[in-house]
Structures are given as structure tokens and as C-alpha cells.
């Protein structure tokens, strides 16, 4: 199905393009008239009027004015496209269709949070699990193949999580493509799609009549979005 917003944007862009053409045509027409009148030693120009009424304007000026009006459609046309690229309307539907039946139970108690600086060829994830005696582990993951490059324990010790546990759980998390994910003991899945931001999507274990849960508004089914 064709997106009506996209059709509207295309129409507005077309008007803007026509407006730009009219400005160019009007401008060069004005130059041409000026040159012709100069060569013929005529110093009265068609737009040299004391009245400011539209009827007294020369055709070239009228073209330029009309072109400017049409060109104002450009930001109106582009802004919906930018918004749609950054925050697509069907993004929630894509997430729901893809992960509505996904089983996150293997990650109960875990949390993952991306720190995306964009300065290196890897992303750093802060990860941990409920009950740890320390803060978080820092995991460097390659951009190219999601290979775990380094695991930094910080103030954690070997009694908190093993390297094997960290690698296994991180690999499971990475396959989803989320920027953050945490699964609590009740089976609530908090999903983040933006770097360095709190989770913006919540999936609860089963359908509920609640219109709001922990600051998330009901979207449909068992899915909620941050208020």
C-alpha cells in the first residue's frame, strides 16, 4: 500500500521544484529585459511603477514572487520525510510483528545497555545481572561482525558472572539488534532502540487491561511505549 504521507511530500516537492524554476526564469527574464532596454537606450522599465498593486508588476517579477511562494513548500515537504526516517510510524508494528512471540526467558535478570559514541570501530555495552555485588561489566563489540573484543570487569569479581555466561548472554542479546534490553523476574521486557537512552518499549508477559505501566502507555496487545 502506498504511503499517503509520501505522496503528499512528493507533490509538495514538485511544487517547490516548479517554484525554483519560476524564480530562475523570472530572474533571467528580468536580466534580459534590462539588457534589451539598455541597448535601446530605454530607461523606463516595465516594473518601474509608483503603484505597488500586483497588476502593475512586470511578468518577470510576478514569476519570481510566485516561485518564492511555491518554494516555501520545500521545508513543509521535507520535514515529514525527516520525521518518518527518524521516527517511522510503522516502527512499533515492525517490532511487534518481529518480536511478539520471541522468548526472552533465557535473559531473565539480565540487563544490556549500549554506549554508542561512534568514535571507534566497536560499540561498548554495559551489562549485568540482578544479584551481582558490583556495578556493570563493559563489553566491547565489533561493528562488523558483533565479535566480542574485550570484557572489562571493573569492580566485579569472578563470583559475579563467568566469562562463559557473559559471552553466551551477550550473543543472545546482540542478535536482536536492540540498543538496550532488560528482563525482570516477572517476565517484563524493557527494550530500547536509541543509544544512551532509557528503554522506550515494554512488552509484558500477557495481555492486560492496564492503560499505563511504570510510565509506559498501552499501544496494543501486550506492548507499551514510554509516555
Image (spheres, grey):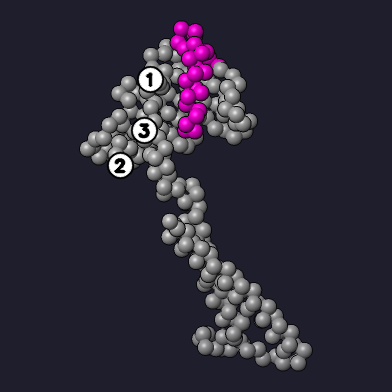
Please tell me which of labels 3 and 2 falls first in the chain: 3
Image location of residue 132, percent across then percent down: 41, 13
Q: Which residues are magenta?
A: 152-179
Residue for point 55% across, 76% down? 65
Q: Residues within 10 Å of mark 3 (few under 14, many from 20)?
A: few
Location of the N terminus by quadrant is bottom left
Question: Does the residue at mark 2 contact the one at mark 1 (Cβ under 8 Å)?
Answer: no
Q: CA distance from mark 2 to mark 1?
A: 25 Å
Q: From the image, tell me which residue sits under label 2.
A: 220
Q: CA distance from mark 1 to mark 3?
A: 19 Å
Please tell me which of labels 1 and 3 falls first in the chain: 3
Residue placed farthest to the left in the image? 209
Q: Any magenta on residue 32?
A: no
Residue for point 47% across, 26% down? 173
Which quadrant would residue 184 be assigned to in this image? top left
Q: CA distance from mark 3 to mark 2?
A: 14 Å
Image location of residue 11, percent across then percent down: 50, 66
Image location of residue 167, percent across then percent down: 52, 18
The image shows residue 199, relative to residue 4, as above or below, that is above
Mark 1 vs mark 3, foreground winner is 3
Residue for point 49% across, 18% down? 168
Residue 109 numbered mark, or none: 1
Q: From the image, tell me which residue sits under label 3.
A: 101
Image location of residue 212, percent across then percent down: 27, 37
Which quadrant would residue 60 be assigned to in this image? bottom right
Please tell me which of labels 2 and 1 falls first in the chain: 1
Q: Residues within 10 Å of mark 1 (few under 14, many from 20)?
A: some
Amino acid at each position: 500500500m502506498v504511503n499517503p504521507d509520501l505522496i503528499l511530500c512528493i507533490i509538495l516537492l514538485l511544487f517547490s521544484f516548479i517554484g525554483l524554476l519560476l524564480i530562475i526564469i523570472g530572474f533571467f527574464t528580468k536580466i534580459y529585459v534590462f539588457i534589451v532596454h539598455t541597448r535601446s537606450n530605454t530607461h523606463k522599465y516595465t516594473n518601474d511603477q509608483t503603484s505597488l498593486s500586483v497588476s502593475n508588476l512586470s511578468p518577470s517579477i510576478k514569476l519570481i514572487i510566485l516561485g518564492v511562494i511555491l518554494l516555501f513548500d520545500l521545508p513543509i515537504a521535507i520535514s515529514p520525510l525527516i520525521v518518518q526516517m527518524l521516527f517511522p510510524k510503522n516502527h512499533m508494528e515492525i517490532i511487534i510483528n518481529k518480536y511478539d512471540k520471541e522468548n526472552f526467558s533465557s535473559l531473565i535478570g539480565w540487563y544490556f545497555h549500549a554506549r554508542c559514541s561512534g568514535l571507534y570501530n566497536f560499540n561498548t555495552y554495559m551489562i549485568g545481572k540482578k544479584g551481582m555485588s558490583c556495578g556493570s561489566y563493559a563489553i566491547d563489540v565489533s561493528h562488523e561482525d558483533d565479535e566480542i573484543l574485550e570484557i572489562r570487569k571493573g569492580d566485579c569479581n569472578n563470583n559475579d558472572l563467568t566469562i562463559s555466561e557473559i559471552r553466551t548472554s551477550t550473543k543472545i542479546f546482540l542478535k536482536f539488534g536492540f540498543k538496550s534490553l532488560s528482563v525482570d523476574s516477572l517476565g517484563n521486557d524493557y527494550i530500547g532502540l536509541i543509544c544512551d537512552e532509557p528503554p522506550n518499549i515494554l512488552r509484558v508477559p500477557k495481555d492486560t487491561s492496564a492503560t499505563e505501566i511504570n510510565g509506559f502507555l498501552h499501544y496494543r496487545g501486550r506492548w507499551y511505549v514510554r509516555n
